[in-house]
Amino acid sequence: MIRLDDITLTFPDGDGFVTAIDHANLAVERGTITAITGPSGSGKSSLLAVASALIAPDSGRVLIDDVDASTLSRTQTATLRRERIGIVFQQSNLLPSLTALEQLEVMGHLGSSNATKRSAQELRARATDLLVSVGLEGQAGKRPSALSGGQRQRVNIARALMNDPSILIVDEPTSALDQERGAAIIDLILEMTLARNTATILVTHDRSHLTRMDAVFTMVDGTLTPAAVEVAAMIAAQ
Amino acid sequence: MFVALRDLRFARGRFILIGSVVLLITLLVGFLGGLTQGLANANISALTPFHADRVVLAQPGMGKTLSFIDSQLSEESATAWSAAPGVTAVEPLGITISKVTAAHDREATVSLFGVEKTFTSISPEQTVPTQDGTLVLSKRAQAALHANPGDPVTVFGHEFTVAAVSGSAEFSHTGVIWMSLTDWRDIVAQQTVKAAPFATALAVQADSSGDFTALDARANTTSSPLLLSLMAIESFKSEIGSLGMMLGLLLGISALVIGAFFTVWTIQRSGDIAVLKALGASTASLVRDALGQALVVLVIGVGLGIGITAATGAMLPAAVPFVVSPVTTILPAVAMVGLGLIGAAFALRSVIKTDPLTALNGQNN
């Protein structure tokens, strides 16, 4: 699971500081999905950056499977991200030189050369299975330029799941997709959260799926507030 | 190397371009290295096989530089060296460059090396004259004069008989003719119309206990280890200086070109590097990837370049002063790869500094 305890994050702004996250608290259990919604500039992506151990908060604790990420060194946080956190980027951020299959296989080659690695055959088999599970059977040999936006997002999701993460961080995955494809991607994330038993945090502007989430939070000016199910339904209805 | 190898495949046009540049620079370095070694051999191959701890030359006069050709050692200097503590053997050597004539008026400029009949400072394969009035020709001198054992060769009006053809010694771009030291002194005395010097140089065997600086001052000589003494051959010094500078510049240019290419390439890839870091790539693995990629380009470019140089060098006619050897192939190849990697290492700054946070777009939303 992931737990954010009293997180505060500020950024320098001219002579002073702007508070991006203001004493935020959040806990997400494995097998559940929590959505965070809010206007642009409210601090949602900053919260994701803290939750993915990409940036250390000014204060508070980021507990990922009981490991406090805010106290780790840069190398240790890289290892944590590699082994426990899957990140689904807003843009698919696929490497142009790799095929769909290789985008997943690369996840087995990011660590130290001395670290125990899965064999190439194991990696390939797992990557192939994952591509099939996200609906990309037959697309393994295609590079990003030959895939559609929806297919690229599916590769993005499969890549995030490649190392069996306990936490899945998803940043506005439908922003570049039409409604139909966006819905399919949300379905896939919900399915993968259950199937892979991940604690998923989803940042989204798309309110139409909020009622399907296990919890919904809104973020306004750096303040994270839980929304009751009824409120979530109301937000969804707007 | 997972991403590095796939980048090489994906951006093959760019890598073929930089690989070709590496290949061409390697060709230049290889050819220049082979030529430098060839020219060096034509200058010094008579002296490099000497077994001498130190080579003694006469101290140059005011405003003059140390020179084998100008050196004139007295017998007193030789005696002072022979008697010095730590010196175990001293053998005089006479060197002069002169025109010689063989049958059918074949003329050649050669280096006359005068040595004692018991001269031991040279490798045992090199024959030296055992009788006055006889000569031993190096292969180059023999080729120039078309003289064989038993044939007469005239040196400054004196007729000598060729006793043997041995070795391929060259000195200052001339073939060497070995003669007895007595004959050498006669010839030099006739050339200079005054008493001949005792010798041009002394080949000295000594242990490290001697105070050679004091001895040089006392004997009016300048001594140095064999390799250092070669700088007293003027043609060698000037050639090795200019060619060495060109080689150094080429190696420097190579490092800069590789460094510039990989810096630009890494900056172009900074988005991908940020994504890989965000996904958990260790900086060490990204550094390994970047240097591994450079190593592949360098090894292929340099390998092909050195291969072409060696193949071409082997086909060149013998008259061309070009040497294909580990010194002219493996050494420059290792230097090219090493310096190229140093150049590529400058690009690592971008790899290390790239912030994984940039992979999350609009993190302040």
Image (cartoon, helix red, strand yellow):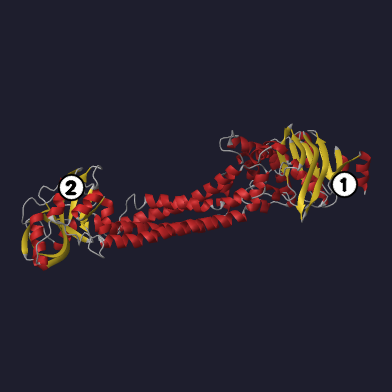
Give the foreground label among 1 and 2: 2
Q: Is residue B62 visible?
A: yes
Q: Is residue B126 visible?
A: no
Q: Say which amino acid is labelled 2.
A: Ser
Q: Say which amino acid is labelled 1.
A: Ser
Give percent across and percent down for residue B329: 36, 52
Secondary element at tag 1: helix
Give percent across and percent down for residue A5: 80, 37
User: Is disc 2 on the same chain as disc 1?
Assistant: no
| Nearest to the observer: residue A57 or residue B59 | B59
Identity of the residue furthest to the top in this view: A66
Mark on residue B121? 2
Mark on residue A208? 1
Give percent across and percent down for residue A182: 80, 48
Position of B150 relative to B206 (above/below) = below
Q: Quadrant of residue A161?
A: top right
| Nearest to the observer: residue A196 or residue A124 | A196
Quadrant placement of the N terminus of chain B: top right
| Nearest to the observer: residue A237 or residue A72 | A72
| Chain letter for the residue marked with disc 2 in the picture | B
Is B183 left or right of A110, judged from the image as shown? left
| Nearest to the observer: residue B3 or residue A15 | A15
Q: Which residue is painted at 71% across and 44% down in the image?
A: A54
Q: Which residue is painted at 53% across and 49% down in the image?
A: B293
Is B183 left or right of A57, judged from the image as shown? left
Q: CA distance from mark 1 to mark 2?
A: 97 Å
Secondary element at tag 2: loop
